Amino acid sequence: MMPASSGKRWSYLGVGSIAVNSSTIPFPATAAAGDLAVLVYSHSTGYTRVLPSGYSWLYSANTVPHHCYKVCAGGETSAPSPGNSPTLDGRGAVMLFRAIGGTPSFDSSYYDAPAASRSATTPAGSPALVIGASARPGVIDVGFQKTVPGDYVTAVENNTGLAFHGGYRFAQPSDTASYFIGPNYSNIRQVMACFAIT
């Protein structure tokens, strides 16, 4: 949990177990209305992404990153897989967050392939949740070495199979947030996304 800003703050509720070759991906707990679910996922490059109903892509202007999010209606316990062949070469997990004092709101996202140093200014007027999600799709049973930025909390990582990493940090309004999952392998793809509380 982070210090309050105008009565608003973020809380991390946990991460579900990693789903391997499954059509559903479990939440860490039953979601309450307004909770933010962030799904990080890696899939073989032989398959395309399919947006689950009610979800939005963390980064929409590309056909590769399978990471997505949803502001929950309440009662959800799992997410559908975002891969078109989820029982073949797919791995993912759901991170769950709560926006106290308001509603989660997507602000911006950035995509780098290969992974590279990325910085952005968080929204003004609200504490921010910054998500760092990376994946090495299409390389089965070969993990990737990585250096997680020191101000991020690693929520979930899978170092074998279709490797991926999901982390987060809380930031104050108008803060500078950076993300780089190194070293710079050519086939590591990363997304940094910022959320505000409205």
Image (spheres, rainbow, N blue to C red):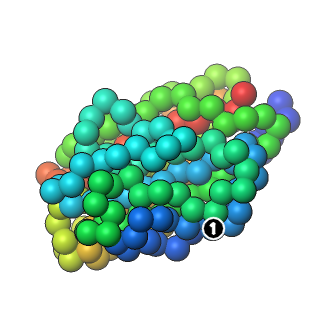
* Quarter-of-image position of residue 88: bottom left
Residue 16 lies, with reference to residue 97, above or below; the image says below
Given residues 68 and 172, the one toward you in this image is 68
Residue 12 visible here: no
Residue 26 in the image, given as x and y percentages of width and height: 55, 67
**Image quarter hosting the C terminus:** top right
Q: Horizontally, is 178 left or right of 183 in the view?
A: right
Residue 84 in the image, given as x and y percentages of width and height: 30, 54
Given residues 6 and 32, the one toward you in this image is 32
Residue 195 visible here: yes
Count all numbered tags in the image, as a single digit: 1
Q: Residue furthest right?
A: 7
Q: Horizontally, is 143 left or right of 178 in the view?
A: left
At horizontal 40% and vertical 49% (from top left) the residue drawn is 67
At horizontal 78% and vertical 34% (from top left) the residue drawn is 102
Amino acid at pointer 1: Pro
Residue 20 lies, with reference to residue 93, above or below; the image says below
Q: Horizontally, is 1 left or right of 86 in the view?
A: right
At horizontal 66% and vertical 57% (from top left) the residue drawn is 76
Task: Find disc 1 in the rendering and name its residue.
Answer: 28
Which class describes the residues within 10 Å of circle 1: few (<14), some (14-19), or many (20+)? some
Given residues 129 and 82, the one toward you in this image is 82
Q: Residue furthest top?
A: 124
Residue 157 in the image, given as x and y percentages of width and height: 42, 68
**Image quarter hosting the N terminus:** bottom right
Residue 43 lies, with reference to residue 157, above or below; the image says above
Q: Secondary structure at mark 1?
A: loop
At horizontal 28% and vertical 60% (from top left) the residue drawn is 85
